[in-house]
Image (tube, grey):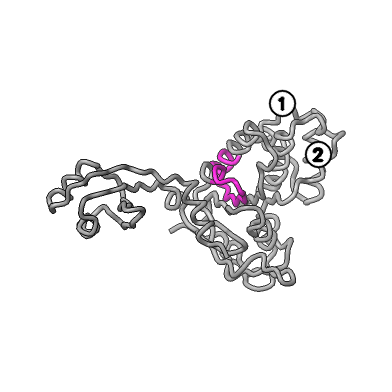
């Protein structure tokens, strides 16, 4: 059984009349890439702020590494909630040395971090000459100082062009392969889908889904069915072992399938029970559609 590295129970953050996070409970396993996904204003940054003690929670609790909340685990966590104040006139190497000195961690690993961030060849270049993507990679590199067990990133690809997003995505995947647990907040579904193993989806501070990204992200197959006797069609369709549920939509039966299926087999099954189809069409419900439906169905 995987080790639980973070457990949050009933976290609440209240700002006057606004409840930014509402009774939030979830856990993160060691070695996972855990996505916190939701639109802007959903409570992602507030949640990360509470977990890193940058923001005081109103109620609830959390524990890192199975230890009480009051234990100082700062050096076991590498955080990037806001971009560090790098000096434009200094190079990447010297900027990281300044950050290491402020945090009280060893600077010996800076060359290795710059290699991981694909910045080693430009380590002597001034920070102000870096592209936005390079600057962001250096910021992530600064969070790796001290070799933390957990890396916490808040919107690491915000403001980047597609090439920059792809570069950061590759870095995150590479870092995770070195055994780091990564907690990543993003409003981009595509980003979370491509790098995360697990996901927490928030809307207005409320948890609406948590679990394996593949469990949420499986493409759902549904089929449109029409027959002369729609009542008989519905009754027979519900007996098929692969049909999970059925729904009526404009005189059409929409059957949601579980697992792979063969259209000819469905047709033959219905024919065996005296149902002759006049229409059969396959629909694929994308992850994006599922995500948008999930948000829509939880509107307050």
Q: Is residue 255 visible?
A: no
Q: Quadrant of the C terminus?
A: bottom right
Q: Based on the displayed image, in which of its 4 quarters is residue 45 positioned?
A: bottom right
The percent coordinates of residue 51 (x first, y second) are 66, 61
| 180 falls in the magenta region | yes
Q: Residue at x 67, y 68 (%)?
A: 19
Image coordinates for residue 267, horizontal then vertical, percent:
20, 45
Q: Is residue 22 magenta?
A: no
Which residue matches tag 1?
121
Q: Quadrant of residue 240?
A: bottom left
Image x and y of residue 139, in percent: 73, 42
Residue 65, above or below 269: below
Tell me the SS state at disc 2.
helix
Classify residue 70 by image quadrant. bottom right
> What number is the disc on residue 298?
none
As helix, strand or loop, the secondary structure at mark 1 comes to: helix
Q: Residue at x 74, y 71 (%)?
A: 16
Q: Is residue 50 visible?
A: yes
Q: Which residues are magenta?
A: 172-192
**x and y, in percent, of residue 130 in the image:** 77, 31
């Amino acid at each position: 059984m995987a080790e639980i590295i973070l457990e949050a129970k009933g976290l609440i953050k209240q700002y006057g009349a606004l409840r930014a996070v509402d009774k939030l409970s979830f856990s993160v396993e060691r070695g996972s890439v855990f996505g916190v996904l939701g639109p802007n204003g959903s409570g992602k940054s507030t949640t990360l702020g509470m977990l890193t003690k940058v923001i005081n929670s109103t109620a609830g609790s959390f524990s890192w590494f199975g230890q009480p909340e009051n234990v100082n685990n700062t050096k076991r966590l590498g955080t990037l909630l806001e971009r560090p104040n790098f000096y434009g006139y200094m190079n990447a190497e010297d900027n990281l040395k300044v950050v290491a000195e402020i945090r009280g961690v060893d600077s010996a690993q800076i060359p290795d971090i710059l290699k991981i961030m694909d910045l080693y060849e430009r380590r002597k270049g001034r920070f102000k000459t870096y592209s936005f993507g390079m600057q962001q990679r250096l910021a992530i590199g600064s969070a790796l100082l001290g070799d933390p067990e957990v890396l916490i990133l808040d919107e690491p690809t915000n403001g980047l062009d597609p090439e920059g997003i792809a570069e950061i995505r590759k870095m995150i995947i590479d870092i995770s392969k070195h055994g780091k647990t990564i907690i990543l907040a993003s409003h981009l579904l595509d980003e979370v889908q491509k790098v995360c193993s697990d996901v927490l989806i928030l809307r207005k501070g409320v948890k609406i889904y948590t679990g394996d990204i593949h469990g949420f992200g499986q493409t759902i197959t549904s089929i449109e069915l029409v027959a002369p006797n729609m009542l008989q069609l519905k009754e027979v369709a519900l007996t098929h072992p692969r049909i999970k549920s059925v729904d009526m939509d404009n005189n059409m039966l929409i059957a949601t399938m579980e697992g792979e299926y063969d259209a000819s087999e469905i047709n033959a099954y219905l024919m065996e029970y005296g149902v002759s189809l006049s229409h059969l069409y396959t629909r694929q419900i994308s992850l994006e559609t599922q995500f948008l439906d999930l948000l829509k169905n939880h509107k307050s």
